Amino acid sequence: MNREPDNLSSCKKCLFILCVLVLAALTGLVPVKAKEATTHEQWREWVGKRVDVNYACCGESACVQIQGARLKVVKEKHIVVITKGSPLLIPSYLIKAVRLSK
């Protein structure tokens, strides 16, 4: 009965786990967090690009998410996005998050 030392088997386990994580990262199985902007200056850089916008609506508990809208205008008091062919003005104080669409 040949038995491997315990440290060798634990090393193999660590190597296996590392290989699985690398493979998952390379194939896109591990979710990548989208870049999120928090300032109007960052939003201005994204004008013309597709963004996802989370904003409060009908109270603090209700939050609406718009996905894949084209960012058209960024002002200090509001932003304008084009969604389903129509412009939508969203006041800045309601915006919870803006991030680039995938």
Image (cartoon, helix red, strand yellow):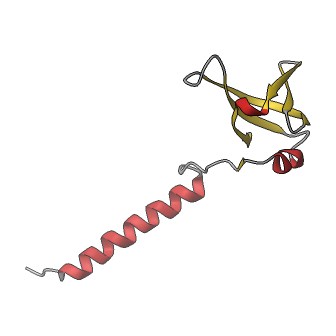
Vertical order, 39 against 101 (above or below)? below
**Residue 49: where, in percent of width, then height?**
86, 40
Instruction: Identify the residue at image location x=26%, y=81%.
Output: 8
Residue in the foreground of this view, choosing between 30 and 81 = 81
User: Between residues 46 and 73, which one lies in front from this camera angle?
Assistant: 73
Quarter placement of the N terminus: bottom left
Taking the image as shown, residue 92 lies to the left or right of residue 23, namely right
Query: Which image quadrant: the C terminus?
Result: top right
Compared to 19, does 68 lie above or below? Answer: above
At 71% from the left edge and 29% from the top edge, which residue is drawn? 94
Q: Position of residue 45 (x, y in %)?
A: 88, 49
Q: Which residue is located at x 18 percent, y 79 percent?
A: 6
Q: Which residue lies furthest to the left in this view?
A: 1
In this picture, residue 11 sits left or right of residue 84: left
Determine the image quadrant of residue 55. Answer: top right
58 relative to 40, above or below: above
Provide residue 92's location: percent of width, then percent of height. 78, 33
